Amino acid sequence: MVDCKQQKGGWECGYIVLQHMFDFVNLYQNQFPDEMWHDTREATDNEIDVLLMTLMPKFFRELGISLD
């Protein structure tokens, strides 16, 4: 199994999957599978908040939904 972030709670896992997908596409894609994740610490609430504030506006713009 790949060493990766895992959450003890039940609701955070979707955000962690989203973060890994984003990281794979933007950071690791060209080095995969030679470069793997080895960050096993839990994501903080702040990291999850930053992920949402970064990705959700882009997601809604792609769907044509205004956030104003």
Image (spheres, rainbow, N blue to C red):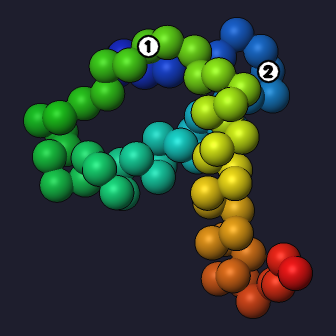
Residue at x-position 50% and y-position 21%: 5
Residue 24 horizontal/vertical position (percent): 36, 48
**Which quadrant does the N terminus fall into?**
top left
Do the CB atoms of the residues marked 1 and 2 lie less than 8 Å apart? no
Residue at x-position 81% and y-position 84%: 65
Pointer 2 residue: 10
Residue 35 horizontal/vertical position (percent): 17, 35
Pointer 1 residue: 40
Secondary element at tag 1:
loop
The amino acid type, in three-letter code, at marker 2 is Gly
- N-term-proximal mark, 1 vs 2: 2
Looking at this view, name the residue that lies furthest to the right: 68
- The mark lying in front, picked from 1 and 2, is 1
On the question of residue 6 being in view, the answer is no
Q: Which mark is residue 50?
A: none
Lateral position of residue 57 relative to residue 54, left or right: right
Residue at x-position 72% and y-position 40%: 49
The residue lying toward the viewer, choosing from 68 and 2, is 68
Residue 64 horizontal/vertical position (percent): 75, 89
Lateral position of residue 37 relative to residue 46, left or right: left
Q: Quadrant of residue 46?
A: top right
The residue lying toward the viewer, choosing from 42 and 34, is 42
Mark 2 Cα shell of 10 Å, populated few (<14), some (14-19), many (≥20): few
On the question of residue 65 being in view, the answer is yes
The amino acid type, in three-letter code, at marker 1 is Thr
**Which quadrant does the C terminus fall into?**
bottom right
Q: Quadrant of residue 36?
A: top left
Work out whether 13 lies above or below 40. below
Cα separation, mark 1 vs mark 2, equals 17 Å
Looking at this view, name the residue that lies furthest to the bottom: 64
Secondary element at tag 2:
loop
